Image: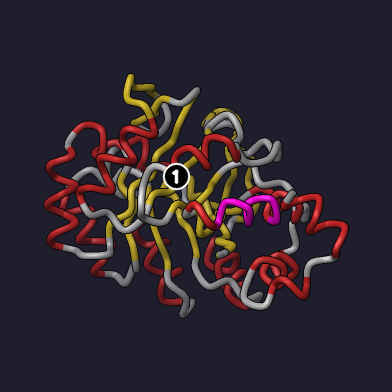
């Protein structure tokens, strides 16, 4: 399972929000490029960027910072936040972003998602951000009546590369991922699902391993990396290739049971 460090960009800085609330943000670094280098040097195989300003404005805002990060590291970078038209996605792919993540447009314009998947194969993922099982849109500021599981099934049929599932009530809280919701969602589609939101410890990551057989292939980790609750090197060793011999018996059995 991939452990994917997250960098959330707000006003050009690396921040974390609490439950998606822009009024409850904490700045962790004034230099996101250095943070990206750090995660890459520690062994991350992919980086997850969210343009929080873009999510509010409906178009990329932190393009210069994103491009600087892409140029500074050699691992793939995926980006979400405010990607609601072809031009925005093309801009990111042209500066070297490996995969773009759409959210609001998946609910409001699924036809566009289908066209994007055809034009940019394997480059379009869908972020499903759920609040009480229903999909939130426009930077988590609005909640639709669309069920997360139904949207995931629809997007899988349109050809998206992956689903990134975030439980908003868990995001930034270090309260653990919503394994039940992840299991339900992943069991109903045949494309990879990446868990996001709430990972607080190595035990949480080991617990997500039980969902690998149903299609949960990775976990995005944000706040826990910045607080030190999760050590990236240790996490990669525990859930990556050859992990089984690295898991302490008591930790592995309790987490996977």
82, above or below 37, in the image: above
**Residue 230: in magenta span:** no
Q: Position of residue 103 (x, y in %)?
A: 32, 41
Q: How is the image coloured?
A: secondary structure
17, above or below 213, in the image: above
Nearest the camera: 142 or 91? 142
Residue underneath mark 1: 187
Q: Position of residue 96 (x, y in %)?
A: 32, 72
Q: Residue at x 30, y 46 (%)?
A: 102
Magenta span of residues: 206-212
40, above or below 250, in the image: below
Q: Describe the element under mark 1 as helix, strand or loop.
A: helix
Q: Residue 227: in sight, yes or no?
A: no
User: Residue lying furthest right in this view?
Assistant: 250
Q: Is residue 68 left or right of residue 102?
A: right
Nearest the camera: 78 or 206? 206
């Amino acid at each position: 399972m991939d452990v994917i460090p997250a960098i959330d960009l707000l006003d050009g800085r690396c921040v974390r929000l609490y439950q998606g609330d822009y009024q409850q943000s904490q700045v962790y670094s004034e230099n996101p490029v250095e943070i990206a280098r750090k995660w890459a040097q520690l062994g991350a195989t992919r980086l997850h960027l969210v343009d929080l300003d873009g999510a509010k404005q409906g178009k990329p805002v932190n393009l210069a910072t994103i491009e600087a990060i892409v140029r500074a590291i050699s691992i793939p970078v995926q980006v979400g936040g405010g990607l609601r038209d072809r031009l925005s996605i093309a801009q990111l792919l042209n500066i070297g972003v490996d995969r773009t993540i759409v959210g609001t447009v998946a609910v409001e314009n699924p036809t566009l998602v289908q066209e994007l998947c055809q034009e940019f194969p394997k480059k379009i993922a869908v972020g499903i951000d759920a609040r009480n099982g229903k999909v939130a849109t426009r930077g988590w500021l609005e909640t639709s009546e669309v069920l997360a599981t139904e949207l995931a099934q629809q997007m899988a049929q349109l050809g998206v590369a992956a689903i990134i599932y975030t439980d908003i009530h868990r995001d930034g809280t270090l309260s653990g991922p919503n394994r039940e919701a992840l299991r339900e969602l992943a069991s109903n589609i045949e494309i990879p699902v990446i868990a996001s939101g709430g990972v607080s410890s190595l035990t949480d990551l080991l617990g997500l391993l039980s969902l690998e057989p149903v299609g949960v292939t990775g976990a995005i980790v944000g706040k826990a990396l910045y607080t030190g609750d999760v050590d990236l090197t240790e996490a990669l060793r525990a859930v990556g290739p050859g992990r089984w011999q690295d898991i302490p018996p008591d930790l592995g059995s309790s987490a996977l049971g």
